[in-house]
C-alpha cells in the first residue's frame, strides 16, 4: 500500500513548510517538493494543514468506575478519536487492589485487542504496592508500560497513602520510568463532603464546592516533594487551576523534572456549568468530573501556562457516562448506567465526561484561531510532547522520514458546531456533548494511522487494526 499526500502545508512542533509526503505501508518514506511517485491513493492537500496524528495521553475506555462502566469501549472510543484527529491514545489499565498489576495489564490488553481502530498504549493505575510486588514495575516497563498513575483522591477506591506513593515513586525512578499523579487531597475533600451531606447539600454544584483548588495545589506540592526525594520524573494529570499550576511553576523553576497536562474542559468550561437549568437542575451532573470545573478566571492562567511551557500537554481525560440512563420513563435499564446514579446525591454521580473527539478542533480554534498559541505549539501540545514524555517519539508525534504515517489533513477553513446532534462531530457513545454548541473553525478532514486511511469525506474507511505501542523508558529517550 502506498499513499501520496500532495501540496500540503506540513506543520510539526518545529517545522512549517510546503511539501509532498510519500507513505509506503505503515511508514513515511519520503518528503519532498513535487514528488512524482506512483501511489495507490493520492490525497490532494492543497489549502490544508498537515499535522502529525494527535496523541491523547489520558483516556478511560471501558473503565469500571463509580458503580458503572465508562460508555465508550476501545471500539467506539478509538473510532471517535480518529474522527477528531487523534491517532494514538494512552489509556489507563487498573490493578485490582491486592492483585497483580500484570494481571490488570492482561485485562486491559483483552479489552483493547481486536477492538481498537487507532494505536494505543497503557499507563498502569497502581492501587497498592507492597514491597513483595515492586518487581512487577520492572516487568511492566519491559512490556512497554513505562508510566504509572497513582491517586491521592477517591479514598476507599483508587486512593493510596503517602508511603505507597513513596515506595512506588522510588522504584519507578530506579527503573527509569515515570509517575502520573492525580493530585488532590482526597482525605480532606472527603471531610468537606461529609459536612455538605450533613447540611443536605446534595445537588451537582456541591461537587465543585467540596473540592477547593487549594486541595489540588496541596496534592501537586506534596507529590512533587515526594518525587524529588524519590528521584522520579513526575507528570501531573488533568491540572485544572491556577493555584495548582503555581506549584508546578515553582518546582520547574527549581529544576525539578515535573510536567503537567491540562484538558480542554478546564480551558473552555467553568464551574457555572454545575448550576444546571431551571427545567433540569440536575443537568450539571454532565460536568461532574474530578478535578471539578473551576471559576472562569482560571482559564486565562492555564492558556498562559500552555503558551509559556509551564504546562506540557493537552489530554482529554475522556471518561464518558450517559446522562439519560435508567431513570428515563418507559426505557429499559441500560447496560451501563450513567449520571442518574447520583440524582439524589452528587457523591454518587460517576465522575468523568466525554471529549476524546473534540480535543484537536477545540485546541486549534481556541489556541491558533483565537491567537493564544502558535501552530507549532498547537502540534507540540496535542501530539509531540506526549510522544516524547511517554517514550513514543519519533515513531509517533512528528512527520519525518521513518516515522509512522499517522497524519491528519486538517482544513483550517472548515467550520463545525460541536454537538451531540452533529453526526460529523459526535461518534462517542455519550448521549450528550460536554462542549455542546461550541463553534470551531478548523477541522480534521482526512486521518491516517500507520498509512491506513481511517477517515475521509466524513466517513470511517477502516475499522480495527489499532496496535499496542510498547513505550520506552525515560532514560532510553535520552540516548
Ligand atoms: O472525573 C474523572 N476525571 N474521571 C476519571 C478518573 C480520573 O480521575 O482520571
Ligand atoms: Zn485522575
Ligand atoms: Zn483520568
Image (spheres, rainbow, N blue to C red):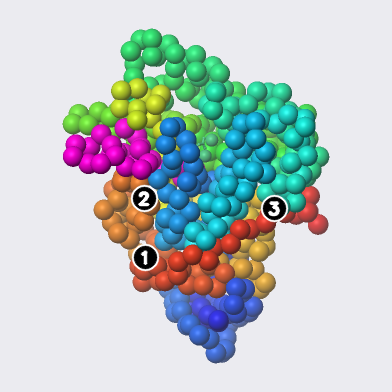
Q: Say if residue 383 shows up in the picture.
A: no
Which numbered disc flags the more N-terminal residue, 1 or 2? 1
- Looking at the image, is 219 positioned above or below residue 387? above
Q: In the displayed structure, does residue 442 sit left or right of residue 172?
A: left
Q: Are marks 3 and 1 in contact (CB under 8 Å)?
A: no
Rendering coords of residue 210 (x, y %): 44, 20
Question: In the image, what residue occupies the spot 36% across and 71% down?
Answer: 457
Distance between mark 3 and mark 1 Cα atoms: 39 Å
Rendering coords of residue 134 (x, y %): 76, 36
Q: Specify the label residue 413 is tagged with.
A: 1
Q: Quadrant of the C terminus?
A: bottom right
Q: Which residue is mark 3?
A: 144
User: Who is closer to the viewer here, 341 or 474?
Assistant: 341
Distance between mark 1 and mark 2 Cα atoms: 27 Å
Rendering coords of residue 124 (x, y %): 63, 42
Q: Quadrant of the N terminus?
A: bottom right
Could you tell me how many numbered marks the image carries? Answer: 3
In the image, which residues are magenta? 313-340
Question: In the image, what residue occupies the spot 73% across and 44% down?
Answer: 177
Q: Say if residue 188 shows up in the picture.
A: yes
Rendering coords of residue 268 (x, y %): 40, 42
Residue 321 on the magenta span: yes
Question: In the image, what residue occupies the spot 60% across and 35% down?
Answer: 96
Q: Which residue is mark 2?
A: 429
User: Who is closer to the viewer here, 138 or 456?
Assistant: 138
Quarter of the image for residue 435 reads top left
Which numbered disc flags the more N-terminal residue, 3 or 2? 3
Amino acid at each position: 500500500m502506498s499513499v501520496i499526500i500532495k501540496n500540503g502545508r506540513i506543520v510539526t512542533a518545529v517545522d512549517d513548510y510546503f511539501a509532498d509526503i510519500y507513505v509506503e505501508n505503515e511508514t513515511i518514506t519520503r518528503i519532498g517538493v513535487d514528488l512524482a511517485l506512483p501511489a495507490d491513493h493520492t490525497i490532494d492537500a492543497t489549502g490544508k494543514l498537515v499535522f502529525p496524528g494527535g496523541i491523547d495521553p489520558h483516556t478511560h475506555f471501558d473503565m469500571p468506575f463509580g458503580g458503572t462502566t465508562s460508555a465508550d469501549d476501545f471500539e467506539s472510543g478509538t473510532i471517535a478519536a480518529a474522527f477528531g484527529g487523534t491517532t494514538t491514545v494512552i489509556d489507563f489499565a487498573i490493578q485490582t487492589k491486592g492483585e497483580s498489576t500484570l494481571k490488570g495489564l492482561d485485562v486491559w490488553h483483552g479489552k483493547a485487542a481486536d477492538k481498537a481502530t487507532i494505536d494505543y498504549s497503557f499507563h498502569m493505575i497502581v492501587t497498592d504496592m507492597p514491597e513483595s510486588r515492586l518487581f512487577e514495575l520492572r516487568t511492566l516497563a519491559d512490556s512497554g508500560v513505562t508510566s504509572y498513575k497513582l491517586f491521592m483522591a477517591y479514598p476507599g477506591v483508587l486512593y493510596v497513602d503517602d508511603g505507597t506513593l513513596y515506595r512506588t515513586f522510588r522504584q519507578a525512578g530506579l527503573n527509569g520510568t515515570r509517575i502520573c499523579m492525580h493530585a488532590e487531597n482526597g482525605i480532606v475533600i472527603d471531610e468537606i463532603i461529609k459536612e455538605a451531606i450533613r447540611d443536605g447539600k446534595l445537588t451537582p454544584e456541591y461537587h465543585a464546592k467540596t473540592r477547593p483548588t487549594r486541595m489540588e495545589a496541596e496534592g501537586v506540592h506534596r507529590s512533587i516533594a515526594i518525587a524529588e526525594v524519590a528521584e522520579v520524573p513526575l507528570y501531573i494529570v488533568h491540572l485544572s487551576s491556577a493555584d495548582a499550576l503555581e506549584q508546578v511553576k515553582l518546582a520547574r523553576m527549581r529544576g525539578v523534572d515535573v510536567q503537567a497536562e491540562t484538558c480542554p474542559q478546564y480551558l473552555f468550561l467553568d464551574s457555572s456549568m454545575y448550576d444546571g437549568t431551571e427545567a433540569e437542575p440536575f443537568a450539571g451532573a454532565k460536568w461532574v468530573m474530578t478535578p471539578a470545573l473551576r471559576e472562569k478566571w482560571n482559564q486565562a492562567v492555564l492558556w498562559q501556562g500552555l503558551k509559556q511551557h509551564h504546562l506540557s500537554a493537552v489530554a482529554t481525560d475522556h471518561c464518558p457516562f450517559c446522562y439519560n440512563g435508567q431513570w428515563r420513563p418507559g426505557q429499559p435499564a441500560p447496560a451501563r448506567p450513567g449520571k442518574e446514579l447520583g440524582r439524589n446525591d452528587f457523591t454518587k454521580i460517576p465522575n468523568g465526561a466525554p471529549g476524546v473527539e473534540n480535543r484537536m478542533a477545540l485546541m486549534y480554534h481556541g489556541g491558533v484561531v483565537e491567537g493564544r498559541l502558535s501552530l507549532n505549539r498547537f502540534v507540540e501540545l496535542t501530539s509531540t510532547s506526549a510522544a516524547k514524555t511517554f517514550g513514543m517519539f519519533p515513531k509517533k508525534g512528528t512527520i519525518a522520514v521513518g516515522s509512522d504515517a499517522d497524519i491528519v489533513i486538517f482544513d483550517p477553513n472548515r467550520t463545525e458546531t460541536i454537538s451531540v446532534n452533529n453526526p460529523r462531530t459526535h461518534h462517542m457513545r455519550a448521549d450528550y456533548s460536554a462542549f455542546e454548541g461550541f463553534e470551531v473553525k478548523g477541522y480534521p478532514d482526512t486521518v491516517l494511522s500507520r498509512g491506513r486511511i481511517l477517515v475521509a469525506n466524513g466517513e470511517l474507511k477502516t475499522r480495527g487494526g489499532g496496535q499496542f505501542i510498547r513505550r520506552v523508558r525515560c532514560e532510553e529517550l535520552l540516548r
